[in-house]
Image (cartoon, rainbow, N blue to C red):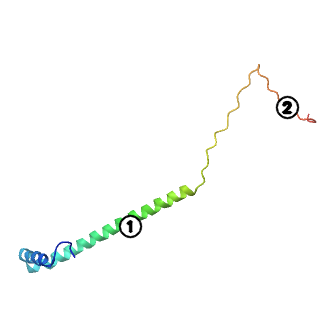
Amino acid sequence: MFGSVGVPELIIIFTIALIIFGPRKLPELGKSLGKSLAEFKRASNELKNTLDEEIRLEDQRSAQRAAEPRTTPTPPPAEPQAVSDDQHVSVPRQNGSA
C-alpha cells in the first residue's frame, strides 16, 4: 500500500499522531491532508493532460510539414542589362512580318 511501510509501522505512526495532536485535531488534519492530496493529484493530472496535448499538436505539425510537397525556391527574375552602343543585338525576323 505505502511501499515498504507495513501495518505495524502504520499503527505506530497513527498512535504517535494521536498522542501529539489529540483526538479532536486528528480528523481535521486528516481532512486537510486529503484535500491537499486531491488538489495535488488534480494539478498533476492537469499538467499531464496539457503536456500530452502539446505533444499531440507538435506531432500533427510535424506530419503536416512532412506531407507538404517540397518546392525549390525560384530565383528572382534577372534585371535587363543595358546595352552599350558598341554592342549589337541581332533579333531574327520571321518571314512575312513587317
The front one of 41 and 68 is: 68
User: Which circle's residue, 1 or 2, is located before the other in the chain?
Assistant: 1
Dividing the picture into quadrants, the one containing residue 22 is: bottom left
Residue 86, labelled with which disc? none
Callout 2: few (<14), some (14-19), or many (20+) C-alpha neighbours within 10 Å?
few
Furthest-right residue in view? 96
Amino acid of disc 2: Pro
Residue 52 image point, x, y percent: 40, 65
Residue 49, labelled with which disc? 1
- Whether residue 70 is situated above or below residue 27 in the rendered picture: above
The front one of 4 and 33 is: 4
Q: Secondary structure at mark 1?
A: helix
Dividing the picture into quadrants, the one containing residue 14 is: bottom left
- Residue sitting at 23 percent across and 71 percent down? 36
- Whether residue 54 is situated above or below residue 13 in the rendered picture: above
Residue 80 image point, x, y percent: 71, 31
Image label count:
2
Q: Quadrant of the C terminus?
A: top right
Q: Which residue is mark 2?
A: 92
- Whether residue 61 is situated above or below residue 72 in the rendered picture: below
- Residue sitting at 16 percent across and 73 percent down? 5
- Residue sitting at 39 percent across and 63 percent down? 51
